[in-house]
Image (cartoon, rainbow, N blue to C red):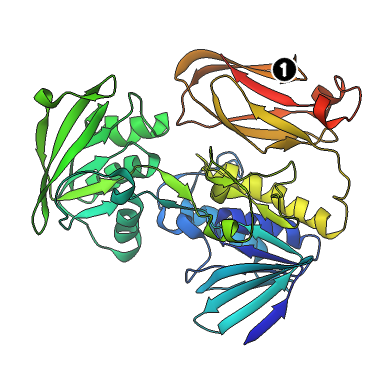
Amino acid sequence: MFEKKYDALIIGGGAAGLSCAYAISKNNFKIAIIEREERLGGILNQCIHNGFGLHYFKEELTGPEFASRFINLIKNKENIDVFLNTTVVNIKINGEEKILSCYSKKHGVLNLKAKAVILAMGCRERNRGNIGTPGTRPSGIFTAGLAQRLVNIDGYIPGEEVVIVGSGDIGLIMSRRLTWVGCKVKAVIEIQPYPSGLTRNIVQCLNDFNIPLYLSHVISKINGKDRINSVDVTPLENGKYLEDKSFNIKCDTLLLSVGLIPENELSRKCGVQINPDTNGPYVDAYQMTNVDGIFACGNVLHVHDLVDYVAQEGIKTGESVAEYLKGNLKDRKQFPVYASSNIRYVCPNKFDPSFDNKFYMRSMIVKNGATLEVKLNGKTIKTFKFAHVQPSEMISVNITREDILKEINDYVLEENKIEFRLE
């Protein structure tokens, strides 16, 4: 059995894991990245479209280009080991030490040990079983991410006449990609009365190619024996099916872009507390979970819109891990953060008044001219104005140290809390 000890272990070699590794490595700690695929980069490797890096690198990159920037930053560093084709199956906690049980194509069974573990496993796609669409079980039904991999990496075209369920960003991007390779994308069907993806993707991937988007509609039946041959589409009104207005679309391929689920089976097994609003761990101001020494960042924590946000979160997590390994996070005062009116969740779940805090959140409403109000102990300390908000577009705001400290008179936990309200 292969055994080795490190200061920190990162599970996942995508944008979150790579950026976190870069931040930790600058402090000369010995770390390892464990990646189940054959190369680093995660989902970025199949995202060959541009639009990445505008916030972090201040230039427009493709997914592989974005990943390569961080891969080059950690390349040939003597204090970073990379285990590819390696899957973590268990995290055991033995006092301060965490033991990762792994299976590797190259090494067989591995036991890797460290004081700190970073969860950066990303997320997986929801599939047909998650949404319960009636009908037969023919071939030709794919998740949008799988179709993206087939086209962009493996060089296969999944079908010729395509219907896409859900207006999430991967589905929208695939509608454009499939059109470019000669497929006919007949429609995008969205159950909500508003799109689930970014506005720019609605414009660039649907409007520019005259692909119809049916809002408040569902696929009510999948038809076909060996291969899918059509779908029945039914409009909704106040949550009720308008069956008399149903129509049929002929197709040989159905792509599902119906949401993402953070990969947290490992997290649950080792006692990490999961937030039901995000399906990711609760974390404090330093991205640490309720389990001492286990941190989380990226899509395993909450589903992000932009990889730039993932990288920023990874850098912050790596810096926090370095401070933890130095013993500098003991007895830090932290206070709770709450999502209030029209906010689904806020992440992270605590704030530390000794430094500037960046918060990510999701709106529960679609509104033009919205105001985000930040309250500390019931008193408004800051407001933000937005031209438009909707659930599919993440809100990100900074609350500075000065914003917080000017209102805090003491450090009693029960008396200091931040609350976010959207009106």
Choose between 152 and 407: the one closer to the eye.
407
- x then y, percent, for residue 413: 83, 32
| Res. 102 image quadrant | bottom right
Residue drawn where x is 68% and y is 23% of the image? 419
| 203 left or right of 101 in image | left
| 32 left or right of 146 in image | right
| Res. 6 image quadrant | bottom right
Crowding near the residue tagged with mark 1, few <14, some 14–19, many ≥20 C-alpha atoms within 10 Å: some
- x then y, percent, for residue 291: 71, 54
The quadrant the N terminus occupies is: bottom right
- Tally of marks: 1
| Res. 146 image quadrant | bottom left
| 323 left or right of 93 in image | right
Residue drawn where x is 25% and y is 42% of the image? 164
The answer to whether residue 166 is above or below residue 287 is above
Outermost residue, bottom direction?
1
Choose between 339 and 168: the one closer to the eye.
339
The answer to whether residue 368 is above or below residue 247 is above
- Secondary structure state at the residue bearing disc 1: strand
- x then y, percent, for residue 276: 54, 40
Tell me the amino acid under the disc marked 1.
Lys
The answer to whether residue 153 is above or below residue 306 is below
Residue denoted by label 1: 382
The quadrant the C terminus occupies is: top right
Residue drawn where x is 73% and y is 36% of the image? 350
Outermost residue, right direction?
410
The answer to whether residue 204 is above or below residue 423 is below
Residue drawn where x is 59% and y is 57% of the image? 267
| 150 left or right of 198 in image | left
- x then y, percent, for residue 262: 50, 50
